[in-house]
Image: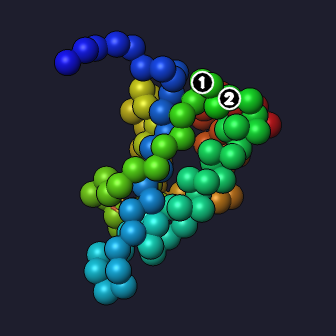
Amino acid sequence: MEQSNPNFEKYVFVCTNERPNGERVSCGGSFCGTELSEKLKDSVKAAGQAGRIRVSKTKCLDVCEEGPNVLIYPDNVWLKHVGLADIPAILEKLGIKP
Ligand code: FES
């Protein structure tokens, strides 16, 4: 094992987990997690911040009913019930001015 510093200043983990109908709700299946992940990633890229901030899809964070869920590290911030309209506010939290 080797240890090093992360390549990015911040990591934004967006849950895109999907489950079949009839199972527990999921950020990517029941809510807009997948679209949120893609649009947030595009927004960070459009702002020229893709080298500083990494938006990554993640699987279940076990808070499904609160979804869509987003975690920001190293800030240790959990955003829940996130909608596409919240993207500007998330960018602001990441230090990206409109
Ligand atoms: S499916 Fe997103 S937290 Fe479980």
Residue occupying the point 42% across, 26% down: 74
Task: Estimate the x, y position of residue 23 in percent, counting from the top left.
Answer: 28, 80
Q: Quick check: which quadrant has ligand 1?
A: bottom left
Residue occupying the point 34% across, 13% down: 4
What is the secondary structure assignment of the residue under circle 2?
loop
Q: How is the image coloured?
A: rainbow
Question: With respect to residue 98, does 1 lie above or below?
Answer: above
Amino acid bearing label 1: Arg
Disc 1 target residue: 52
Amino acid bearing label 2: Gln
Task: Estimate the x, y position of residue 16 in percent, counting from the top left.
Answer: 45, 59
Quarter of the image holding residue 78?
Answer: top left
- Whether residue 4 can be seen here: yes
Disc 2 target residue: 49
> So how many labels did they put on this image?
2
Q: Nearer the viewer, residue 92 or 58?
A: 58
Q: Could you tell whether 51 is left or right of 3 in the image?
A: right
Residue 23 - label? none
